[in-house]
């Protein structure tokens, strides 16, 4: 009497590993997680708003209603409550303001839309700067080791010894307030995180067999470091960068709230909060909506970063 052994069931994802690329696998895993999908949806909406703000905004984000042509001046009043015509607020030609007017008689909805463009630009530009500098420093330290590694890492340790926001405030105070200076400060305080991530990845990858083979075949330092080691050490950097955009947006909003970042009349969510912080009881809508926009943007990048971390981690491949 013979017995038949049931064939083991193989995960369809494991079967197709050889026929698809790493990014296809990552995309498949990413879309399986509801949290990352929610983050991508929110982020897609924010990008759409940022790209089309000039068409979506009914008024100029920097111009007062007193200076707006053909605007009825009797309705140009400070901190006017929201007025939406379909909800019955229209009377005697009162203009529509979805989120009301701020303390400088500017349309809050238009400023909020343009603020999405500025916030995304802040997050992406500062993280790009920090990743570029941090990757170069971390790669050089991890690959060469010795005194080069010690010097680079000790400088990074000094920067990490200070709270990032306090260090950014100190830098902006020295070089002067302004949006560009705020971006530079946030980028500088973000460099150590990326340098340490890249250094750790390079230390683990440089001992792999394919790196040793390239070295044995006469590959130069540039080819080994930038064509063999770094492309295979960037996975944790992608996750760190996605999460870092959220932190950069939050830090920029904090600096603008303190008056050290974007200067009036630039439509930036942090400065909008700072300008109306004393009106939280009399005009709460002027504080609530910029705060909500910051929260949703940071939430979107955090959800996407968590999803990327899980999707790129082979130890979590079995989790759907």
Image: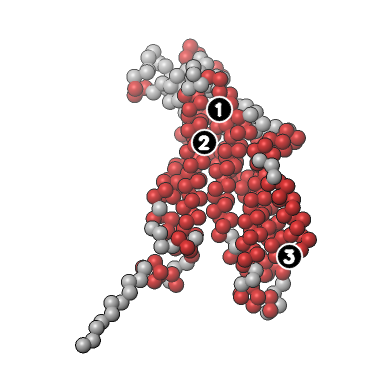
Q: What is the CA distance from the residue labelled 2 to the residue labelled 1?
A: 10 Å
- Tag 3 residue: 144
Q: Name the residue nearer the viewer: 241 or 105.
A: 241
Q: Nearer the viewer, mark 3 or mark 1?
A: 3
Residue 4, image x, y percentages:
25, 82
Q: Residue furthest top?
A: 74
User: Residue 241, percent across and down?
Assistant: 57, 51
Measured from the top left, where is residue 318 in percent x and y? 41, 62
Return the residue found at the far bottom. Answer: 1
Classed neighbour count for the residue bearing mark 1: other residues with Cα under 10 Å, few (<14), some (14–19), many (≥20): many
Distance of mark 3 from mark 1, alpha carbons? 47 Å
Tag 2–tag 1 contact (CB < 8 Å): yes
Which label is found at residue 273?
1
Q: Quadrant of residue 175?
A: top right
Of residue 177 and residue 137, the one placed in the foreground of this image is 137
From the top left corner, tell me how far across and down residue 210 is, in percent.
61, 75
Q: Quadrant of the N terminus?
A: bottom left
Q: Residue at x 62, y 66 (%)?
A: 204
User: Pointer 2: what residue?
Assistant: 294
Total labels: the figure holds 3
**Mark 1 residue element:** helix
Pointer 3 or 1: first along the chain: 3
């Amino acid at each position: 009497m013979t017995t038949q052994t049931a064939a083991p069931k193989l995960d369809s994802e494991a079967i197709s590993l050889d026929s698809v690329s790493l990014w296809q696998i990552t995309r498949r895993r990413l879309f399986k997680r509801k949290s990352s999908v929610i983050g991508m949806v929110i982020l897609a909406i924010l990008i759409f708003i940022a790209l089309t703000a000039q068409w979506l905004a009914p008024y100029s984000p920097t111009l007062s209603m007193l200076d707006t042509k053909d605007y009825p001046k009797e309705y140009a009043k400070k901190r006017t409550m929201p007025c939406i015509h379909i909800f019955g607020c229209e009377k005697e030609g009162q203009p529509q303001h979805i989120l009301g007017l701020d303390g400088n008689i500017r349309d809050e909805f238009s400023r909020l839309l343009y603020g999405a463009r500025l916030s995304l630009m802040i997050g992406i530009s500062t993280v790009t700067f920090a990743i570029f500098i941090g990757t170069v420093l971390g790669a050089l330290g991890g690959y060469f080791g010795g005194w080069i590694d010690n010097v680079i890492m000790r400088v990074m340790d000094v920067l990490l010894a200070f709270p990032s926001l306090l260090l950014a405030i100190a830098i902006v105070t020295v070089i002067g307030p302004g949006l560009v200076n705020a971006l530079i400060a946030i980028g500088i305080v973000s460099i150590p995180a990326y340098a340490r991530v890249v250094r750790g990845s390079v230390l683990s990858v440089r001992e792999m067999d394919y790196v040793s083979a390239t070295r044995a075949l006469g590959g130069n330092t540039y080819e080994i470091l930038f064509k063999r080691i770094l492309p295979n050490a960037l996975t944790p950097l992608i996750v760190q960068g996605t999460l870092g955009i959220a932190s950069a947006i939050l830090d920029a909003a904090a600096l603008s709230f303190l008056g050290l970042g974007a200067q009036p009349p630039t439509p930036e969510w942090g400065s909008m909060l700072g300008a109306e912080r004393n009106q939280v009881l009399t005009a709460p809508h002027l504080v609530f909506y910029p705060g909500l926009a910051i929260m949703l943007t940071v939430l979107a990048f955090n959800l996407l970063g968590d999803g990327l971390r899980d999707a790129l981690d082979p130890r979590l491949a079995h989790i759907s």
